[in-house]
Amino acid sequence: MSYELREHTADIAVEATGETIDAVFGAVADGLAAAMYDEPPGKGDRFELTRTAESREALLFDYLDELIYRRSRPSASGSYGNRRFP
């Protein structure tokens, strides 16, 4: 599982690889965190996410949308952050 950040007309792109779709999605999540922060936050709570979609692309969109949502909402302590994407 690995990712690479690339220049893109929309700002930045994440190119991810992995042996399974789970590994690719994990690499994309790591790339997203790397793109959002100079130093990605440390390990945080893990959570289970179940989604269905019409295609892999739609599934990836929904997955990233959920990660961004969870990252932007305050934690139980009232802070925004210090949660790492799975």
Image (tube, rainbow, N blue to C red):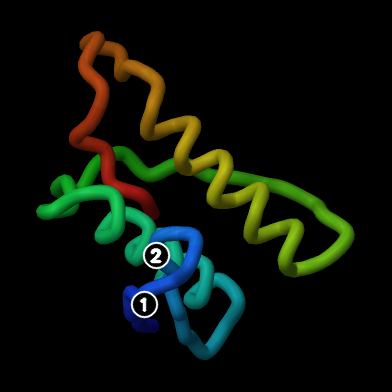
Q: Is residue 59 above or below residue 47?
A: below
Picture quarter with the C terminus: bottom left
Q: Is residue 40 left or right of residue 46?
A: left
Q: Position of residue 70 (x, y in %)?
A: 44, 31
Name the residue type under label 2: Ile
Q: Position of residue 39 (x, y in %)?
A: 11, 53
Q: Is residue 75 left or right of residue 86?
A: left
Q: Are marks 2 and 1 in contact (CB under 8 Å)?
A: yes
Examine the image and state in which quarter residue 31 appears: bottom left
Per the rendering, the mark at residue 76 is: none
* Residue highlighted by disc 2: 12
Label 1, secondary structure: give it.
strand
| Residue behind mark 1 | 6
Disc 1 crowd rating (10 Å Cα; few below 14, some 14-19, many 20+) is few
Residue density around tag 2, few if under 14, some if 14–19, many if 20 or more, within 10 Å: few
Name which quarter of the figure residue 46 lies in.
Answer: top left
Q: Residue at x 26, y 38 (%)?
A: 83
Q: Vertically, is 56 above or below 77?
A: below
Residue at left offset 46%, top offset 39%? 68
